[in-house]
Amino acid sequence: MPRKKIKEDIKYPDDMDLIKGSTKLQIACRSGDLEEVKRLCNEEEVFLHFINNMGKTALDIATIKGHTEIVNFLTTLKNN
């Protein structure tokens, strides 16, 4: 299945949790769920540069939480 285009310039994605201000991708990055991160990136439109209520992107969250594999995966996507 081809990966959908990654949107980088939309302020409010459809999957945003309005209470927490985070996307599904950000939540998966916070929990360290690499398989869910991969699934979201392959099956849904994701917003790599969306900033949550705490001023953090998905990559920021994965970095802060020390989820190195997710950081590497997202960095690869970002550079493509």
Image: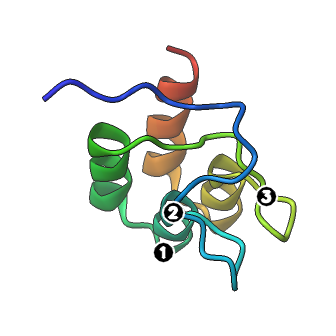
Q: Nearer the viewer, residue 21 or 66?
A: 21
The residue mark sitting in front, 1 or 2, is 2
Query: x, y percentage for residue 49?
Result: 70, 40
Q: Say what secondary structure mark 3 lies in.
A: loop
Q: Which residue is mark 2?
A: 15
Distance in Å between CA atoms under marks 1 and 3 = 15 Å
Front label number (1 vs 3) = 3
User: Is disc 1 in contact with disc 3, using a CB cutoff of under 8 Å?
Assistant: no
Determine whether 9 is above or below 49 in the image: above
- In the picture provided, is 42 more to the left or to the right than 71? left
Report which residue position mark 1 lands on.
Answer: 31
**What SS does tag 1 mark?**
helix
Q: Do the CB atoms of the residues marked 1 and 2 lie less than 8 Å apart?
A: no
Residue extending farthest to the left is 1
Name which residue lies at 64% across and 47% down: 59
**Residue shown at 37% from the left, 66% from the top:** 33
Tell me the amino acid under the disc marked 1: Ser
Q: What's the distance in space between the residues labelled 2 and 3, CA to CA?
A: 16 Å
- Of 41 and 18, which appears nearest the observer? 18
Q: Which is more N-terminal, label 2 or label 1?
A: 2
Across and down, in percent, residue 63 comes to 66, 54
Instruction: Please state if 47 lies on the left or on the right of 20 as rendered.
Output: left
Question: Could you tell which of marks 1 and 3 lies nearer the N-terminus?
Answer: 1
Mark 2 or mark 3: which comes first in sequence?
2
Instruction: Give neighbour class at mark 2: few <14, some 14-19, many 20+ (Cα, 10 Å).
Output: some
Mark 2: which amino acid? Asp
Circle 3: residue type? Lys
Residue at 65 percent across and 69 percent down: it is 22
